[in-house]
Amino acid sequence: MTRTADHLEFEIKDALLADAGAQRIDWAAREMPVLRLVRDRFAREQPLQGVRIVACVHVTTETGNLARALKAGGADSVVIASNPLSTQDDVAAALVAEGIRVYAIKGEDTVTYNRHVRIALDSRPQIIIDDGADVIATLIKERKEQMGDLIGSTEETTTGVNRLRAMQQDGQLSFPAIAVNDSQTKHLFDNRYGTGQSTIDGILRATNLLIAGRTVVVVGFGMCGRGVAMRARGLGAKVIVTEVDPIRAVEAAMEGYQVMPMEKAVEAGDLFITVTGNRDVIHTRHLERMKDGAVVCNSGHFDVEIDLAGLKLIADGPKLLRPFVEEYRIRSTGRHVIVLGEGRLSNLAAAEGHPASVMDMSFANQALAVEHLVKNRSRLSAGVHILPAHIDQDIARLKLMAMGISIDEMSDSQRAYLGGWELGT
């Protein structure tokens, strides 16, 4: 624990990295014009004045701009990491220098991660911005007496939204939770274009492998999987998709991808990328049958998609080959399997996460979701909500304006036609 002269508490790697972090946050801000407009309005109107917020997020340059927007709106924020390997230490230092309490260190162990969650809850938050629902889950399991403080929460990821809905089904969600992930200006763009590019970026930075000519197996064809498959094919890969959802499987087939069960794909793949949000989608029985030198990595939120615990039982290793690149030797076959980023989010462990331009819309959603909770406190029912459609539309309009793109508008007669029923053949 470190303490500055003004008694600001924090736990980061190195406060001397602040200048470098601030410069990188400023660079990302150039690609985040929508969030900048939200921040400017927040600074004028102070809609979050005095609101206690915990933000459990990937502490990246883009998140740095979200934290600045919340502070501009008057919030009292605590920022913690949502993944042990995703923190950018210079960004954490920069936010501390700007007066924001941060508890995040790249590479922190699970004990430290959980301690930071509890430190954040000690601030008795009124709003929780979550990325994976760990803070909300800890609050419900360990701090029920604090739930009366809560105005509500927002959730960034598909995995977290799934957990919130499970909490609601179990009768545990006694406050409104906004599924930011379900906003169209989030999941249609961040999940697809952000995950698609950043996952490939992380793989390339970690390995410097040539993608062209390789067989890439994309496990899951949700929005994230679609983005990964699209980018891998664009680099010249032969792409196989595995799925459990028949509708998504049909879509993948009609997009021109090979679709097959993992039991068959496992023998063809050179590079495996999991993006399902589920556990053990690459099991030890799959790892045992892979080609010698096959590479496996994950871009789903938690490190459960690849059965690493099982791998350690059947293999020798890991042997560190490069940063974030570990090799295991399967004892029964003598073959080698290479795991990237300890099975955690490869795009954040080995790279910088999503590009700022796509996170612009995601974090505009987050900032406006927080404002929506504050403005509607006591009026929103307990349970999972999505942001009103007009907020989604406003974010899209602002993004188009920033991109220099204009679109058509319907005439009054067209609106009347779409709202009527009398005209026809």
Image (spheres, grey):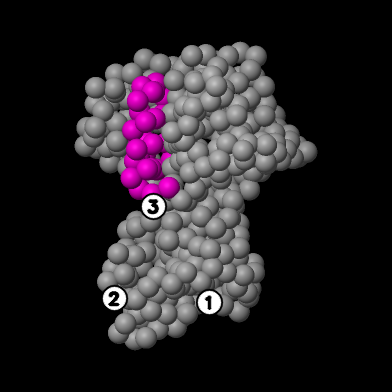
User: What distance separates the C-alpha of mark 3 from that of mark 2?
Assistant: 22 Å
Residue 378 on the magenta segment: no
Q: Amino acid at mark 2?
A: Ile
Q: Which residues are magenta?
A: 108-136
**Nearer-the-camera pick, 415 or 52:** 52
User: What distance separates the C-alpha of mark 1 from that of mark 2?
Assistant: 25 Å
The residue identified by callout 3 is 302
Q: Which residue sits at x=56%, y=43%?
A: 89
Residue 337: percent from left, percent from top: 42, 76
Question: Alpha-carbon neighbours of circle 1 within 10 Å: few (<14), some, or many (≥20)?
Answer: many
The residue identified by callout 2 is 314
Q: Amino acid at mark 1?
A: Thr
The residue identified by callout 1 is 215
Question: Alpha-carbon neighbours of circle 2 within 10 Å: few (<14), some, or many (≥20)?
Answer: some
Label 3 sits on a secondary structure element that is loop
Residue 327: percent from left, percent from top: 44, 73
| Nearer the camera: disc 3 or disc 1 | 3
